[in-house]
């Protein structure tokens, strides 16, 4: 029998190697499929049940409301989605812009940073509760008079914050720039701007806003 040439040996080896590769590939595919099935079986199951609801009784703009809300819902979303008080705006939704400012039990807060169910029995005032177009709150009237807004998106938060700022000063609550913590704070320009610094106006109407607040500060409410 004649000896095989090098070419014939190489061809035979190639065919043998190809067959081996195909067999190994089949083994690996089977193992991979089995591993994927095992991982799927171990994967956490996403709950499909309804969200947990909580009951909260809250007074908003002088009206009592008994709400059933998702326990994860913010006060901002409860005001907008349940009570349809859309004057309170959702800006950054991270407590950095102040567009969602409302007054709770006399103190201003960012309503996007607090859960609705945390306010059982609280008294909330939104921009709708301060005044109406026919009977505006002095702060609302001053914002109109001094053109304290441009696009208007931040205005409701600015006004709620401004109303609370004047109450803070009257109550003797100091700010970060108050010189004498033992003396009654004075609403100087720097005090006013510091206290309102949490409310951002992307249009840049800060000077007009400051003038409107200063006007109300000197006017009896």
Image (tube, grey):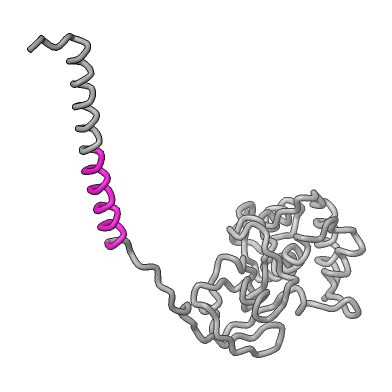
Q: Report the predominant secondary structure element of the magenta stretch.
A: helix
Q: Is residue 119 above or below residue 109?
A: below
Going by the image, does 176 lie left or right of 218? left
Q: Is residue 194 above or below residue 69?
A: above
Going by the image, does 56 lie left or right of 147? left
Residue 32 is situated, as x and y percent measured from the top left of the image, at 27, 47
Residue 162 is situated, as x and y percent measured from the top left of the image, at 74, 65
Q: Residue at x 66, y 71 (%)?
A: 171
Furthest residue toward front: 1
Residue 48 is situated, as x and y percent measured from the top left of the image, at 43, 74
Q: Residue at x 21, y 38 (%)?
A: 23
Q: Residue at x 88, y 69 (%)?
A: 141
Q: Is residue 22 above or below residue 134?
A: above
Residue 156 is situated, as x and y percent measured from the top left of the image, at 76, 66
Answer with the quarter of the image where residue 183 lies: bottom right
Q: Residue at x 85, y 58 (%)?
A: 148
Q: Tell me if residue 117 is in the magenta stretch.
A: no
Going by the image, does 58 lie left or right of 117? right
Q: Which residues are magenta?
A: 25-41
């Amino acid at each position: 029998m004649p000896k095989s040439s090098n070419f014939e040996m190489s061809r035979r080896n190639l065919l043998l190697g190809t067959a081996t590769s195909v067999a190994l590939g089949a083994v690996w595919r089977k193992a991979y499929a089995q591993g994927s099935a095992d991982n799927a079986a171990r994967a956490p199951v996403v709950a499909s049940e309804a969200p947990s609801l909580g009951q909260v009784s809250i007074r908003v703009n002088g009206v009592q409301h008994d709400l059933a809300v998702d326990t994860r819902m913010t006060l901002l979303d409860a005001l907008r989605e349940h009570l349809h008080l859309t004057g309170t705006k959702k800006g950054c939704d991270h407590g950095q812009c102040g567009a969602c400012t409302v007054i709770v039990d006399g103190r201003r807060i960012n309503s996007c940073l607090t859960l609705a169910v945390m306010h059982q029995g609280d008294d909330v005032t939104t921009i709708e509760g301060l005044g109406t177009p026919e009977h505006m709150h002095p702060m609302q009237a001053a914002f109109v008079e001094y053109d304290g807004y441009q696009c208007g998106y931040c205005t409701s938060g600015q006004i709620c914050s401004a109303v609370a700022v004047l109450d803070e000063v009257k109550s003797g609550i100091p700010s970060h720039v108050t010189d004498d913590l033992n003396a009654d704070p004075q609403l100087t320009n720097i005090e006013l701007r510091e206290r309102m610094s949490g409310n951002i106006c992307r249009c840049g109407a800060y000077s007009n806003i400051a003038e409107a607040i200063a006007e109300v500060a000197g006017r009896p409410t």
